[in-house]
Image (cartoon, rainbow, N blue to C red):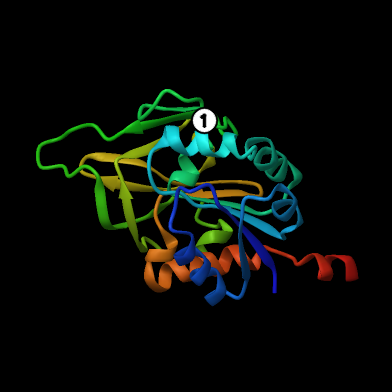
C-alpha cells in the first residue's frame, strides 16, 4: 500500500483524514518531519483554522521549502480546506504571505441578504475539469461538505477544477495542476463521494517499491 504523509502543523483534524485514507487503501503517516515527508509516496496538507497561524506554523517547523520542493518534484500532493488556501499568495483573512505556489488571493464571501457566512454544510460541485482524476467514478454535480468563510481566487482560471455556488457567488472549490490537487471542501466528511475522491487520489500514487521494481 502507498504511504501518504499527512502534514502535522497543529491546524487540522488529522485523524479523520487518516481514517479516510485507510479506507481508500493507503497507509497514512502523520508527521512534521521533512525526511518522512520526502520519503512518502504522496503528501496531504490538511487544515482547519485561520490563514496567518497556518503559514506561521509551517514556517516555524521549516516546512515551507520542503512543501515547495515536493510539489516541484512531481509527487502527488493534495491540499484540503485551509491546505488549499495557504498554497496561494495572500489572504484577506490575514497579513502573512502565503506559500505562493499558485498565483492568486484568498477572498472573503461578499455579504448578501440571507447569505450565511461561513458556508457550512453540503453543496454541489460544478466541474470545470470534468476529466480530472479526482472526479473519476463520481458523476456530475456531487454533494460535498464545506465549512469556510473564504475562498481562493486563482489568477489563472485554468487551474480551477471545480466551482461551487453559495448565494449569488460562484467560486473556486478545487484546483488541479499536474501533480498538485487541492479542494476547499472536506472529502473526509463527505460520505461515499469523499471517500471516492480520496480513493482517486490514492490511485495516482505508485509506491516506491513498485516503482523501483518496474
> Which residue in the rendered view is the most extreme toward the top?
95
- 17 versus 97 height, above or below: below
Assign the C terminus to one quadrant of the image: bottom right
Q: Nearer the viewer, residue 96 or 195?
A: 96
Q: Is residue 176 above or below residue 139?
A: above
Q: Residue at x 56, y 34 (%)?
A: 102
Q: From this viewpoint, is residue 40 visible? A: yes
Instruction: Please state the horizontal and vertical placement of residue 129, each as a whole percent of the image.
Output: 51, 50
Q: Name the residue: 58% across, 35% down.
A: 60
Asked whether 120 or 57 is in front, the reply is 57
**Residue found 68% across the figure and 35% down from its top:** 65
Left-right relation of 44 to 161: right
Quadrant in which the N terminus appears: bottom right
Instruction: Report the residue at 50% width, 71% height from top.
Output: 19
Q: From the viewer's perspective, is 103 left or right of 4?
A: left
- Residue closer to the observer: 178 or 44: 44
Query: Residue 168: horizontal and vertical position, in percent?
Result: 22, 40
- Residue 214 appears in the rendering: no
Q: Position of residue 31 (x, y in %)?
A: 62, 55
| Relative height, residue 171 to residue 123 (above, below) | above
Q: Residue furthest front?
A: 60
Q: Secondary structure at mark 1?
A: loop
Percent coordinates x, y for residue 104 in the rendering: 49, 28
Report the residue marked by disc 1: 98
Amino acid at each position: 500500500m502507498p504511504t501518504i504523509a499527512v502534514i502535522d502543523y497543529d491546524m487540522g483534524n488529522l485523524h479523520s483524514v487518516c481514517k479516510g485514507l485507510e479506507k481508500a487503501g493507503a497507509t497514512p503517516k502523520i508527521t512534521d518531519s521533512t525526511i518522512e515527508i520526502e520519503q512518502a509516496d504522496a503528501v496531504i496538507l490538511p487544515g482547519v483554522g485561520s490563514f496567518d497561524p497556518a503559514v506561521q506554523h509551517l514556517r516555524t517547523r521549516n516546512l515551507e521549502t520542503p512543501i515547495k520542493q515536493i510539489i516541484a518534484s512531481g509527487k502527488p500532493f493534495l491540499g484540503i480546506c485551509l491546505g488549499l488556501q495557504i498554497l496561494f499568495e495572500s489572504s484577506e483573512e490575514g497579513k502573512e504571505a502565503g506559500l505562493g505556489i499558485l498565483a492568486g488571493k484568498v477572498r472573503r464571501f461578499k455579504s448578501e441578504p440571507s447569505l450565511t457566512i461561513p458556508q457550512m454544510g453540503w453543496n454541489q460541485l460544478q466541474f470545470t475539469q470534468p476529466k480530472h482524476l479526482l472526479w473519476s467514478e463520481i458523476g456530475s454535480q456531487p454533494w460535498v461538505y464545506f465549512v469556510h468563510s473564504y475562498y481562493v481566487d486563482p489568477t489563472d482560471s485554468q487551474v480551477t477544477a471545480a466551482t461551487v455556488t453559495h448565494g449569488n457567488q460562484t467560486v473556486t472549490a478545487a484546483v488541479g495542476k499536474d501533480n498538485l490537487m487541492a479542494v476547499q471542501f472536506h472529502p473526509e466528511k463527505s460520505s461515499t463521494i469523499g471517500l471516492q475522491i480520496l480513493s482517486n487520489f490514492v490511485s495516482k500514487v505508485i509506491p516506491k517499491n513498485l516503482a523501483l521494481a518496474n
